[in-house]
Image (spheres, coloured by chain):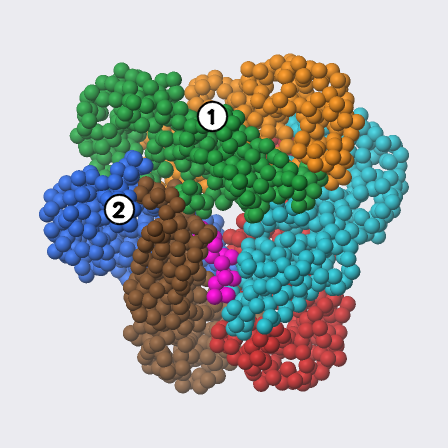
Chain colours: A blue, B brown, C green, D orange, E red, F cyan
Amino acid sequence: MGFARVNEVDSVDLVRRALSEDIGAGDVTSEATVPEGARARAVIVQKADGVVFGVDVALLAFSLVDEGVVVEERGVEGRWRDAGAVVLAVAGDARALLAAERTALNFLGRLSGVATSTARAVAAVEGTGARVLDTRKTTPGLRMLEKAAVAAGGGVNYRIGLYDAVLIKENHIAVAGGIAAAVAAARERAPGLPLEVEVRDSAEIDEALAAGAPLLLLDNMSVAELSAAVAQVGGRAELEASGGVTLETLRAVAGTGVDFVSMGALTHSAPALDLSLQLELLA
Amino acid sequence: MGFARVNEVDSVDLVRRALSEDIGAGDVTSEATVPEGARARAVIVQKADGVVFGVDVALLAFSLVDEGVVVEERGVEGRWRDAGAVVLAVAGDARALLAAERTALNFLGRLSGVATSTARAVAAVEGTGARVLDTRKTTPGLRMLEKAAVAAGGGVNYRIGLYDAVLIKENHIAVAGGIAAAVAAARERAPGLPLEVEVRDSAEIDEALAAGAPLLLLDNMSVAELSAAVAQVGGRAELEASGGVTLETLRAVAGTGVDFVSMGALTHSAPALDLSLQLELLA
Amino acid sequence: MGFARVNEVDSVDLVRRALSEDIGAGDVTSEATVPEGARARAVIVQKADGVVFGVDVALLAFSLVDEGVVVEERGVEGRWRDAGAVVLAVAGDARALLAAERTALNFLGRLSGVATSTARAVAAVEGTGARVLDTRKTTPGLRMLEKAAVAAGGGVNYRIGLYDAVLIKENHIAVAGGIAAAVAAARERAPGLPLEVEVRDSAEIDEALAAGAPLLLLDNMSVAELSAAVAQVGGRAELEASGGVTLETLRAVAGTGVDFVSMGALTHSAPALDLSLQLELLA
Amino acid sequence: MGFARVNEVDSVDLVRRALSEDIGAGDVTSEATVPEGARARAVIVQKADGVVFGVDVALLAFSLVDEGVVVEERGVEGRWRDAGAVVLAVAGDARALLAAERTALNFLGRLSGVATSTARAVAAVEGTGARVLDTRKTTPGLRMLEKAAVAAGGGVNYRIGLYDAVLIKENHIAVAGGIAAAVAAARERAPGLPLEVEVRDSAEIDEALAAGAPLLLLDNMSVAELSAAVAQVGGRAELEASGGVTLETLRAVAGTGVDFVSMGALTHSAPALDLSLQLELLA
Amino acid sequence: MGFARVNEVDSVDLVRRALSEDIGAGDVTSEATVPEGARARAVIVQKADGVVFGVDVALLAFSLVDEGVVVEERGVEGRWRDAGAVVLAVAGDARALLAAERTALNFLGRLSGVATSTARAVAAVEGTGARVLDTRKTTPGLRMLEKAAVAAGGGVNYRIGLYDAVLIKENHIAVAGGIAAAVAAARERAPGLPLEVEVRDSAEIDEALAAGAPLLLLDNMSVAELSAAVAQVGGRAELEASGGVTLETLRAVAGTGVDFVSMGALTHSAPALDLSLQLELLA
Amino acid sequence: MGFARVNEVDSVDLVRRALSEDIGAGDVTSEATVPEGARARAVIVQKADGVVFGVDVALLAFSLVDEGVVVEERGVEGRWRDAGAVVLAVAGDARALLAAERTALNFLGRLSGVATSTARAVAAVEGTGARVLDTRKTTPGLRMLEKAAVAAGGGVNYRIGLYDAVLIKENHIAVAGGIAAAVAAARERAPGLPLEVEVRDSAEIDEALAAGAPLLLLDNMSVAELSAAVAQVGGRAELEASGGVTLETLRAVAGTGVDFVSMGALTHSAPALDLSLQLELLA
């Protein structure tokens, strides 16, 4: 993917550090048992159904320890596939492949886990008109990759950090002296940025609409409350529901008519996708 | 903890990068709405039962943006506590606390999730004599912290990387020409390191014992197979069971008499511990 | 400023590298001539009228070589002041102040130059309703600081990088097969982000409006063309004028009724603000 | 240039960081509108007369996002050329070229601006025997590149930092107890380094000559004062004039017979050279 | 060596920093005198007998400044060879080879010095049954490379850092309340790690054996004391002798029957191996 | 030393990396045996006569793991002292002091070894008028610190890298077409830098003098050849002797009347100074 190629600029550093923490002084087992110069093929396969993401990063792990590594097959990313699908097949120096194996799998497992969780959530909202948003609840150091994994799973990337969108919460409103004041201050400070206001009840919804907020955050509301909010707003602003939404409750939430449902669990609690790597020594 | 103080040398870099990816050009919302110089108190509380780990790292996140931050209360780490327990309470510059909030919570949530998953596993094996081991299936870049979280949850840290222990697997045995040859080569190359051999059946167990392997890896065996292996070995070596062990299957596996059960899920699939941060502005 | 305190996380690294490239093996002149332990006061003063920005960064330069440095006076940032105004006065180890002097001034001079250029531009558009935008034409490595300097000078920060806003230009339109298709693709890929479309003539303005673009870029148009575009759009979208605007031509451009005028020169061609540092040895 | 090839060791890091701050999570616009795998040609052309410098660094920006980028044409650096001259033409992945475009231009614009300013200054002193020196007033983080740009423009690189030459100024003299003492101390501390002494009047010139200083700094002197100093020194030492010299006053200063004129403005206030990049999609 | 290929991940960073500190703003001499584009061959040869190590790192130094460098000959590492043996012959850009020459030689000289010192020590113990261990007394920043050099010289790598083995010394014993308590605490905290106990006399040997310590450290003992300890232990644990052992005293120490002799001097005081680099310009 | 304080900017990074490679996942032994919060005093003492250097760096190692560490005594650096002299005494957290002990000693031992070797060389040339120079044959990554150690031992720092002085060697002369041409090219390219020319015989000395070279390098000449060269030059240039000079041959070389003798062995082959650290637990 062109996107991932571009991202390589930052990924190289991440992968280097990951390789370094795993390999350290060297892979003593392989050095002792695998002859120098031996060649091998490594094939990574899905052991569970899901959406793979991170093939470029995994490949980077192999190519950083063996720049002559050859890609024999590359699986499709960003699409739901069944267990057994090939994710990546490479051939290269046997010691190098063994040295990078765990790093490649750790990246792939985590990122594919995020993509797969997202894909399940996206499937759950199908037909409701709502879209699934990610959050800033990402693994420290991996935000960009995890957000790319969310996109690969069909989710929508919300703000990347504190700097690229305004999200006015309860505390900000209290300090600023009300929603109108807070929105005005934010429009003055950051006229070019997306803006969202957290609202807790019907009165605040009116205040936020009056202040011209294009997007309202409905945090920790029941389905009934969400439905009421949707009705009250009547399309005058977009609505995001958030707060402890799980795959089980997601469809009901999405069915209220909100435009977005954000789920921290996409990134902070996604189980890794189960993958296997088969290594075959070449004559 | 003295341990964490020492670890700070590496953690500072990790936390800096995490803050940088979240804050970027600055927290536009707080800058617009929170007056310069305002003071606040932030209190992090468990929203779920579990074992907290990572308070030092969270505190580092706050102190890197406000070096004058004051610790008002610090919760106990490494012990099971109920929802509602205070994790950390700090007072400092309001804008700074808001800027570091998400980074602090992202570290704490993930590391406490690992500690909590480990604690559940440790509880499950109680009385069996088996101990719970971690693996190298950690989040890229966070291995040291996640291994510390496993220790905080009562688990045992297995090898840190490819360099500090010998683990002879199927492929190594095939290339080296048998278990005896592989063990001899590893003893020659790395005489000072712990050594483990993967065995697949009764014949290989005999071979590994004959080669003097002090620790055998039994991968993906059924409970019956594990019990048979325990009987066959009869204490002549330690035994580690691994391979897709879940919290549900763990106790049966541990009950076979193996010495160690390793679980990748402790680190690669632990859901984050649910935490909340309440921010209160000070007059 | 709370903002700058937060920014320190990244600035520390920038200032460290700048000190390192200047000091290298040490300040041989001061080591030879200034006694160890001597104390001094350094006072930085404006030699030209303008807006100062970067006092926190300058202070960081001093405190990284002498952590005990004492701030005796700090000038006001972000406000137009006459030559002679004090920018920063510190007292500390004489050798350390001499070692950091040039680094502190290099940051302050450049950032204050950007702030001052911006302030001149902001003054030029006063009363027109147009606002001054910055661009991505910043010094490599200093984008965040330069954008903060623009804000200090009264300008508006436009997108920080390629990732936090959509700007559909001629090439994108050509490849995507028209404005409507490009806008639709961008809305699908990045529903949460600000979106702007470059338009070259009246027909494209209609197309962009039909596609629902909230912001149109009018690049390299004459004042007459801009006025016509403003009339055609009639408030249905916001308008940005760009392309070789100078301080001389700025007011005429702003007077056409566009909402924003962006100027690369704010950052890529701002002359440094002239500053002096007086060093006084203390008995 | 061989020189630049060598410099690449440091430049790679600078360019990486610049790409990272611009691209961040990815170029959302191009991802949405430009098909994966599309090819393009990018041609950078001078829009103003001047001296180009930084082609290697610009090329690095492209090759770091697309290692298969092909150089089709490379302009001449370090020579005055008219608007319209081709600076660099490359072909490669369309998304990658778009992602690196601004970073490449930001480096090229700034470095060529420095080279062009220097070339203008060098032209202004032609025939006077004086040479144009740069200073330490460079952009933080870019010193080496900016000094190379000065050299490309025909200027002479003066000391790189505080460590590779002795420059005894007023403060050092005061503390050391006179010029003779300061020179002696510096010769003792750093026998191998170039040495220069700042002098303020005729008496100090005599003192410095007596102390054997090979180079004298005449700071902020009028043309008349400079001429008098040249006459007094009579070739017994080299002379550098500095202090607020502009392109307008430069020739008069150089005409006094000094050997060097140093100008901070070469680096701290050089406007960027105006460049354009045309991108053409390949079938 | 496959091992070194793997290590490249970390070595690249080390070599980059070393090149950067030597080349800085560029090799002024070669730039002035060697024409751009000139080609050359560089041949590194041993000027003294010894064991070479570090050819991969040296090659990295050349390839980082000229990625097209061609390896014409590579000497054998890890084997004793006489003065005159070729270490590495490369052809490439003349300026680049000159720029990297000193960095390549500095790495090679130091690492080969360590390998050679180790080889001398290994020869000295031949036939005694004892093996030569390294220590943590390595050059800051170069531990992994120096440990690899020790292995190349035939020595055995002992623990890499404080984290991968337990070594209970006098102070730990005092604080823990005796050897038994210290060993028990360590077994509990780090069940999977190698464990060694320092013993000072016959009573402590008994205590350590009773506590089940598999390896005892005999620090600063005379040959007679060592022999007595060997007799007392009678094979119930392995023994390491340490403390100021030199090449002169080594054989006597090894002859006492201990299993290991550790020598800090292998890394902290090894003289560099004398090497020469001949550069030949190619027509 | 003020100098070292300034140098801290770079040293922090070096010390951090050194601590990181030694401590890694933590000091398992101390964690198991030393109670959290225990206090201790560490006293570093010379075990051999010599010149200490690096106390600031050692202190940095302690303070990076325990920012509250208290300095109780600091030995004198840069002066010859007998075995038994105190180098540094600190009090702090016991676990932290144990964690940093080896890193502190590794820096101190190496840098003091360099200072001590230099001091021996300086003593050997006393009265001859010659001065001892260092070279670029330093440990990769530690050049600045090792050059500071040479200065502390009384030696003179020669060029720091390839960029701050011109040294025209045989190869450069051959390519440039003679000494005169090489010197002229270098003066043109780098007018402000020190310049030295390597000469091999009497004819080349004449050429170099004619070209105005202020410093001549006499490499690998016998004492008789050196004396003849001194006589021939007759003070018209300074002279540096180099090439395999040892402490044994140094005085004879210096006695020929050359101005400088450079010795790579000062840095590449200096044995570490023997130091001990006593740790005492505080009640």
Helix, strand or loop at disc 1? Answer: loop
Q: CA distance from mark 2 to mark 1?
A: 37 Å
Chain under disc 2: A
**Residue B12 counted in the magenta span:** yes
Q: Quadrant of residue F111?
A: bottom right
Query: Overall secondary structure of the magenta stretch?
Result: helix
Q: Is residue A103 above or below residue B151?
A: above
Q: Is residue A175 above or below residue F70?
A: above
> As drawn, is E247 to the left or to the right of E174?
right
**Mark 1 belongs to which amino acid?**
Asp
| Closer-to-camera residue (D245/E131) | D245
Marks 2 and 1 share the same chain: no
Quadrant housing the C terminus of chain E: top right
Q: Is residue E4 above or below residue C132?
A: below
Residue F43 drawn at (x, y percent): 66, 64
Residue D167 visible somewhere in the drawing: no
Residue F152 drawn at (x, y percent): 73, 49
Residue drawn at (20%, 46%) of the image: A216
Tally the marks: 2
Residues in magenta, as a range: B1-16
Chain under disc 1: C
Q: In this figure, which residue is indicated by the disc labeled 2?
A: A173
**Mark 2 belongs to which amino acid?**
Ile
Q: In this figure, which residue is indicated by the disc labeled 1?
A: C82
Q: Residues within 10 Å of mark 1 (few under 14, many from 20)?
A: few
Residue drawn at (35%, 82%) of the image: B255
Residue drawn at (63%, 42%) of the image: C39
Quadrant housing the N terminus of chain E: bottom right
Q: Is residue A279 above or below residue E72?
A: below
